[in-house]
Image (cartoon, grey):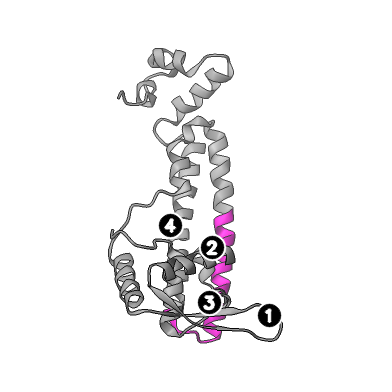
Amino acid sequence: MARRRVSNPLALAVLSCLAERPMHPYEISTTLRSRGKEDSIKLNYGSLYAVVESLQKHALITARETTREGRRPERTVYEITEAGLAELEDWLSELLATPVREFTSLEAGLSLMPGLPPDDVALLLAKRAERLRVELRTLDASHAEAEQMQLPELFLVESRFRHAMLTAELEFVTRLAEGIQGSSMAGVKAWRKMHELRAGGLTVEEILADPVRHLGEEGPALQPPSS
């Protein structure tokens, strides 16, 4: 990935707006919100101003004029520069073409889930699955409304992508919860036994000192790899 002078994804959204026409920050914010971009890009007014200042500092946008309407505060209208247009095109091309390894909170939780008893994990995953279903129903309703409005598919691409990702996540966590709850996943029986032993007063260190005796044949598989 290229090293960007301004790397916040919100900066890319600002450049995209200003590539259409000059705008002041409040107009950029309302434009992004009216198009539902806050579902894809973290957006708040304070960070937007910081991003605008950074883009101006790096000559990717420039102030065009300052206006005042009645008693309202002055508003600076910004426009994109040639360097900004080049950055927009290069950045977008990179994002669309280059896979990037992203570390998600779910992946972090899954990697450390043996720290909780398996039945608790199965219950938590089931709760997550229900929340995913709610979010998918909301997206389905939004898509149905968009179809009634005959909104071009072009403007639904990120929403379709999110739907696909949520659907895949729902399928994964549902199967995982079922595998844990039914002990059909390899290692779950030893995992459950370990928490039972810990509840009985043994420490993890004591259990793993002799995993076969405490956990059975699956025990050694639960030992973390030596460094």
Q: Nearer the viewer, mark 4 or mark 3?
A: 3
Q: Amino acid at mark 4?
A: Ala
Q: Which residue is mark 2?
A: 47
Dominant secondary structure of the residues highlighted in magenta in the image: helix
Label 2's element?
helix
Tell me where residue 21 appears, x and y as whole percent: 45, 85
Q: Amino acid at mark 1?
A: Arg
Quadrant where the N terminus sits is bottom left
Q: Which residue is mark 3?
A: 28
Q: CA distance from mark 2 to mark 4?
A: 32 Å
Magenta-tinted stretch: 131-154
Which mark identifies residue 214? none
Is 84 left or right of 32, judged from the image as shown?
Answer: left
Considering only vertical position in the picture, is 30 above or below 221? Answer: below
Q: Earlier in the sequence, mark 4 or mark 3?
A: 3
Which mark identifies residue 168? 4
Q: CA distance from mark 4 to mark 3?
A: 33 Å
Label 4's element?
helix
Q: Is residue 160 visible?
A: no
Q: Nearer the viewer, mark 1 or mark 3?
A: 1
Q: Nearer the viewer, mark 2 or mark 4?
A: 2
Q: Amino acid at mark 3?
A: Ile
Q: Nearer the viewer, mark 2 or mark 1?
A: 1
Considering only vertical position in the picture, is 133 above or below 226? Answer: below
Considering only vertical position in the picture, is 33 above or below 107? Answer: below
